[in-house]
Image (cartoon, rainbow, N blue to C red):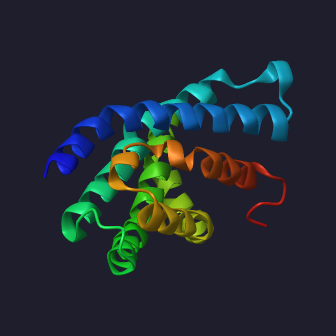
Amino acid sequence: SSVWSEFTWRSSGINAEYGGTVFLLGDLISQQLIEERGKEHQVERTVRSVAVGTVYIAPFVTFIYNFADKLFGPSLALKAALRKMAVIAMFSPLTSAGYIAVNNLFQGKPVSETLQKWRYDLPAIVLNGYKVWLPTHFFLLTVVPLRHRVSTRHHTVLKLIFDLLVASPGYGD
């Protein structure tokens, strides 16, 4: 359909732009407000965060939405939304594992460290992600029409809240 082709064409570039921006803001807030780094800001970390958001998270989230919409159509019906949420929930562990791998790759960390992080940190990351992202996706899939779901801009506030949660003292303890 024309809505589908417009969504696919527009979503790739727009999501990369918003993905990088959201990750930039998340890292800036984390380093300056939570960690209070001030002049000791880790620019490499911010650049890496923007790169991961741009080249991995944004395209992968776009793929998941495109895949779910292709399977169940762009309907706002509750039944279709629940089916799409099942697809999103199914991909969530893969999204998180990929994020860890890409981030560690950009940091030059050995594969053994990535495997260790998957083993010990991945379950908590996925479960915390479900708490934030499944309600967000439910809202987007039942309320926001397809033509307005072309970017991650709807996720910006929740992404920033999730970044603050992850960066807060005692997270994961």
The front one of 92 and 5 is 5
Residue at 23%, 44% (x, y): give it.
Answer: 8
Q: Quadrant of the C terminus?
A: bottom right
Give coordinates of residue 45: x percent, y percent. Answer: 62, 30
Residue at the bottom extreme, as displayed: 79
Quadrant assignment, res 142: bottom left
The front one of 131 and 139 is 139
Whether residue 35 is visible, yes or no, is no
Residue at 27%, 62% (x, y): give it.
Answer: 74
Image label count: 0
Give coordinates of residue 136: x percent, y percent. Answer: 54, 62
Whether residue 123 is visible, yes or no, is yes
Give coordinates of residue 147: x percent, y percent. Answer: 33, 47
Residue at 54%, 67% (x, y): give it.
Answer: 126
The front one of 56 and 145 is 145
Q: Is residue 5 above or below residue 43?
A: below
Give coordinates of residue 148: x percent, y percent. Answer: 40, 47
Residue at the top extreme, as displayed: 39
Q: Is residue 5 above or below residue 137?
A: above
Quadrant assignment, res 86: bottom left
Left or right, residue 95 beside residue 158: left
Left or right, residue 46 beside residue 173: left
